[in-house]
Image (cartoon, rainbow, N blue to C red):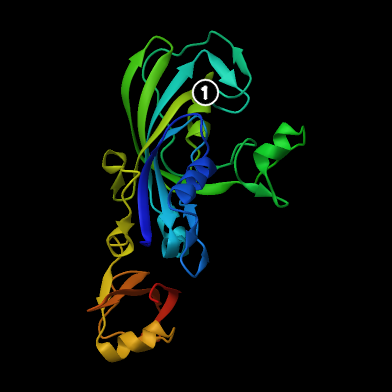
Amino acid sequence: MSDGVILYDKPAGVTSHDVVAGVRRRLGGRRRGSGRLRVGHAGTLDPFATGLLLVLVGRATRVQRFLMALPKTYEATARFGAVSSTGDPDGELTFTGVVPQGDLALPSGRLRQRPPAYSAVKVRGRRAYALARAGEQVELAEREVTVYRYEERWRRGERRAFEIECSSGTYVRTLIAELGDAYCEELRRTAIGPFAVSDADPERILALQDALSFIPEVRLDPQRAERVAHGAPVPSSAAAPGPIVRLTDAGGLIALAEPHPDGLLRPVVGLRG
């Protein structure tokens, strides 16, 4: 069984958890001689949303946080003249008939955003949406997010489509709701960092070495490679090319490491053996 990443085009009406469970069943659920096969994902998509989901298999689950931190690109259809209790078509809709005219500007740059009550953020160990559906008041802390760019792609009657590139943790539903009397009727994730939904193939596991190729590489000699494989830090022979690096040798990927001011590369995720 390979360790790696599946680029999965999630359909509407299923959860990200459903996709992970289906992949686990398809792959047999267990590794020979090593217990349950670990399968996860790098960034939830709401049930109504479609598009790219990175499904992590085996050791790829160890690098989840680095994949989740990648910027995202979405295609969002805003439906004006109505508001939704959840910001999407799954909520209670209230029709206002107020449809704006002319151009509209989404907020861009760095901004403070409060996750919606109906979100997957955990509060006291439970998902916020579960608390909200149970009638509990949910007040989530603001977070800093970044909208790198947006573009209006088309407009037809009460609907307009936007392409939005944003940082991890950005709620597109909230961006759309802040345009006025509007909610996010359709949402499709088209890219996560260097990964595109056009390359999705549920039957293909992208090798971990290839999936992490966006992280700068530091090649090690055999002596330093052996130390890193046992979790020990090693001195860097040159200035580190980034805040996180991929340590490799002739045999491939060994670990991800963080450069420290003392000149050492300290492994944070072991990926060999």
Q: Which residue is mark 1?
A: 183
Q: Above or below — where is 188 with respect to 248?
A: above
Q: Position of residue 142 (x, y in %)?
A: 60, 46
Q: Above or below — where is 80 with respect to 113?
A: above
Work out which residue is located at the far bottom of the displayed protein and give it. Answer: 223
**Figure label count:** 1
Question: Looking at the image, can residue 18 be seen?
Answer: yes
Mark 1: give few (<14), some (14-19) or many (20+) Cα within 10 Å. Answer: many
Q: Position of residue 80 (x, y in %)?
A: 48, 16
Work out which residue is located at the far left of the displayed protein and give it. Answer: 250
- Please name whichever residue, 151 or 87, is drawn nearer the observer in this view of the structure: 87
Q: Quick one: quadrant of the N terminus?
A: bottom left
Circle 1: residue type: Tyr
Q: Above or below — where is 141 with respect to 217?
A: above
User: Residue at image x 26%, y 88%?
Assistant: 222
- What is the quadrant of residue 4 in the picture? bottom left
User: Residue at image x 25%, y 77%?
Assistant: 251
Q: Position of residue 173 (x, y in %)?
A: 51, 32
**Residue 242 falls left or right of residue 147:** left
User: Residue at image x 24%, y 87%?
Assistant: 221
- What is the quadrant of residue 212 in the picture? bottom left
**Residue 159 falls left or right of residue 218:** right
Question: Looking at the image, can residue 264 be seen?
Answer: no
Q: Position of residue 194 (x, y in %)?
A: 29, 50
User: Residue at image x 61%, y 24%?
Assistant: 91
Q: Element under label 1?
A: strand
Q: Quick one: quadrant of the C terminus?
A: bottom left
- Please name whichever residue, 30 or 42, is drawn nearer the observer in this view of the structure: 30
